[in-house]
């Protein structure tokens, strides 16, 4: 851990957002996330010179990343959401994916960019990509802020990735533990 991250961790020991829960380390601080999200917005802008772009956020985890990201995509676009759930209150994937909300927007003929906060086991993406392909989009790509690079049998990999993530349970910037900590502006691992 660098000196700056370590100092930040000490400062955060009394962060009222954590309700006393200790952090093991800060994996990505706010400044690094904002810088990378800006770069990703520029990459995405360049990758879609034409066509109707639909940015499809996978809730709930992607809500903060998506809101920051779309403000760095400098071309026309639409936003919609999908709701799926694969984890319960634990820290290990349950392996089942449930689709709780289907996007209202017509997907056929559009360039779909599916936005994920993190690719972990890859089960969520395998299931959702198969489902979305059936809607006949013009193109279908994945944009993930974090990628653990542990997914086996990933049928569709992410075209845009923010950071390779440590193999730890991460919270913040949309990522939760039992629905807590999504609002942290940084990404950290819990003790
Ligand atoms: C988490 C995370 C990803 C998915 C990744 O979502 O936000 O969507 O799991 O895991 P996988 O690669 O092992 O499938 P979760 O189901 O916890 O819902 P949430 O987005 O509401 O937190």
Image (cartoon, rainbow, N blue to C red):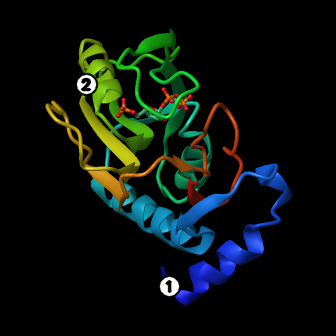
Tell me the quarter of the picture where residue 10 sits: bottom right
Residue depicted at 54% across the width and 34% down the height:
79
Chain-order first, disc 1 or disc 2 = 1
Structural crowding at the residue carrying mark 2, measured as other residues with C-alpha within 10 Å and reported as few (<14), some (14–19) or many (≥20):
some
Q: Position of residue 36 (x, y in %)?
A: 46, 68
- 103 on left or right of 179: left
- 20 on left or right of 31: right
- 110 on left or right of 104: left
Residue depicted at 18% across the width and 33% down the height:
154
Q: Tell me if residue 61 comes above or below residue 18 in the rendering.
A: above
What's the mark number on residue 103? none
Q: Position of residue 38 (x, y in %)?
A: 50, 66
Instruction: Assign the C terminus to one quadrant of the image.
Output: bottom right
Q: Position of residue 52 (x, y in %)?
A: 38, 35
Secondary structure type for disc 2: helix
Residue depicted at 24% across the width and 28% down the height:
138
Q: Nearer the viewer, mark 1 or mark 2?
A: 1
Outermost residue, right direction? Answer: 16
Could you say which is closer to the camera, residue 3 or residue 60? 3
Could you say which is closer to the camera, residue 1 or residue 118? 1
Q: Position of residue 155 (x, y in %)?
A: 15, 30
- 184 on left or right of 80: right
Structural crowding at the residue carrying mark 1, measured as other residues with C-alpha within 10 Å and reported as few (<14), some (14–19) or many (≥20):
few
Q: Tell me if residue 135 comes above or below residue 178 in the rendering.
A: above
What's the mark number on residue 126? 2
Q: Tell me if residue 115 comes above or below residue 183 in the rendering.
A: above
Where is mark 1, residue-wise? 2
Mark 2 Cβ inside 8 Å of ligand 1 = no
């Amino acid at each position: 851990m660098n000196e700056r991250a370590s100092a930040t961790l000490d400062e955060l020991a009394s962060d009222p957002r954590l309700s006393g829960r200790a952090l093991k380390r800060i994996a990505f601080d706010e400044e690094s996330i904002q810088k990378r999200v800006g770069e990703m917005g520029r990459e995405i802008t360049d990758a879609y010179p034409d066509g109707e772009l639909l940015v499809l956020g996978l809730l709930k985890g992607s809500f903060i990343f998506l809101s920051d990201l779309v403000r760095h995509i400098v071309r026309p676009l639409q936003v919609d959401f999908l709701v799926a759930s694969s984890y319960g209150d634990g820290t290990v994937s349950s392996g089942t994916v449930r689709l709780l909300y289907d996007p209202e927007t017509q997907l056929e003929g559009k360039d779909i960019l599916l936005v994920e906060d993190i690719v972990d086991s890859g089960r969520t993406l395998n299931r959702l990509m198969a489902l979305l392909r059936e809607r006949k989009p013009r193109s279908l790509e994945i944009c993930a802020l974090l990628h653990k690079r542990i997914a086996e049998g990933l049928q569709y990999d992410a075209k845009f990735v923010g950071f390779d993530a440590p193999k730890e349970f991460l919270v913040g910037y949309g990522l939760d533990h039992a629905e807590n900590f999504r609002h942290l502006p940084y990404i950290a691992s819990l003790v």
